[in-house]
Every structure is written in C-alpha cells, then in structure tokens.
Amino acid sequence: MTNDTCDPECCTHIQPEPEPSSGPTGDSTSNSSNSSNSTCASDGCNSDSAFTDACESLQFFSCIDAATFDDCSAVCMTASAEDKSTFASCVGSGGVTQCDAVGCYYTFNPEAVPGPTPQQIADCKMSCESLGFFDCLTGTEAASWAASCDEATQEVIEGFLICTADPTDCAAAVECFE
C-alpha cells in the first residue's frame, strides 16, 4: 500500500459517541441505540461518496466547470471501487485549492479533453480588463480579447497570463494575445 492511496474501509464521517444524558432518575445513560460512535454514517463511508466529494471539491475551487462536474459524477457510476478510492485520494492530496489536482480527473477519465480551468478563464478576462484600465487597449479591444478567453486553449491562456503579468507594460501587452 502506498502513502497516497486511502484505505476504502477508512471513513471521515465517523460520528462521535453521544454526550451522556440524564434519565428521569438522574442516572447518566448513553443512547445505546446510536451505534454510529464507531461506525460510518450510512451515506458517507463508501467510495461513491468520496468520489462525489472529490468532484465537488474540483468544481468548488473552479478547477472544473459545471459540464465537467457532470461528467465527473457520471464516471463515478461505472468506475470500480478501487478506482474511485484512488481518484478521491489523488484529489485530496493533489492541491485542489490551487487546481493542481485537476490532473487527477484527466488521468482518471482519459476521454476528457483537458482545457483551461474556469479560474484561468476568469484570470484571462481580468487581465484583459486590466489592460483596458491601464489604457493598453481600448474598451472594445479589451472586451473582444476577454471574449476570446472563453474559446482559448489552456496553453494560450497560460502564455497570455504570463505575458500580461505587468498590465502597465503596454508595449509587451499588445503582442500577448495572438
């Protein structure tokens, strides 16, 4: 077993033992009918739940868009329990807040075509707005370039963001988005 693979028997939804309550006679009793103190909640311990949580995390941090989230959730229906667990572990340890974990999805679903993340598209549009703000582009040009962000490839957006890191350098900015 490797360190980055989660044990499918492990569960993050274990419920703590309930607080003792006083019965009518003042005796301290625990609720013996609640067996969740050392077992998993019925909806949170299986690999389907972990897989869905991983897909939700990717969407929450703008690593995937809504359509890709739907695809991610659909893949869960046909994946093996081992694959689901591996995917969930990959996302959990892959840096989801910075979208480094998005590669887990594209590795898990090889039919998916990697594209820019929603956050990269938003950053691209913000860069265009900044170029307009600093008068490197006219308002019409900035709007046109921002619209191009929706159709640009991941590589083009990444290059554009690097190129426009200084939105006050108008001479360099004009050559950025080709």
Image (tube, rainbow, N blue to C red):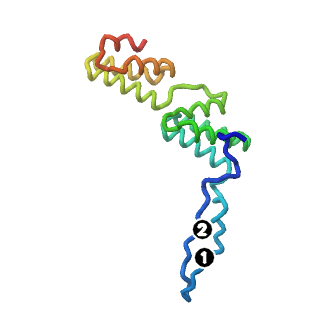
| Residue 134 percent coordinates (x, y) | 26, 20
The earlier-in-sequence mark between 1 and 2 is: 2
Residue 10 left/right relative to 177: right
Q: Are marks 1 and 2 in contact (CB under 8 Å)?
A: yes
When asked about the image quadrant of residue 16, the answer is: bottom right
| In the image, residue 56 above or below residue 146 | below
Decide if residue 87 is on the left or right side of residue 127: right
Q: Residue at x 40, y 22 (%)?
A: 147
Where in the figure is residue 97, as x and y percent of width and height?
A: 49, 38
Q: Which mark is residue 30?
A: 1
Could you tell me which residue is drawn at 57 percent across and 38 percent down?
69
Are there few (<14), some (14-19), or many (20+) residues within 10 Å of tag 1? some
Res 147 label:
none
For badge 2, the amino acid type reads Glu
Determine the residue positioned at 30% across, 15% down: 169
* 167 or 124, nearer to the observer: 167
Report the residue that reaches farthest toward the bottom.
25
Q: Quadrant of the N terminus?
A: top right
CA–CA distance in space, label 1 to label 2: 9 Å
Q: Relative to the observer, which residue lies in front, 42 or 38?
A: 38
Q: Quadrant of the C terminus?
A: top left
> SS class of the residue under badge 2?
loop
Q: Position of residue 34 (x, y in %)?
A: 64, 70
The correct choice, above or below, for 164 with respect to 41 in the image is above
Q: Residues within 10 Å of mark 2 (few under 14, many from 20)?
A: some
Q: For the residue labelled by badge 1, is the local secondary structure a helix, a strand or a loop?
A: loop
Image-quadrant location for residue 6: top right
Q: Which residue is disc 2 drawn over? A: 17
Residue 108's x, y, as percent? 66, 33
Q: Amino acid at mark 1?
A: Ser
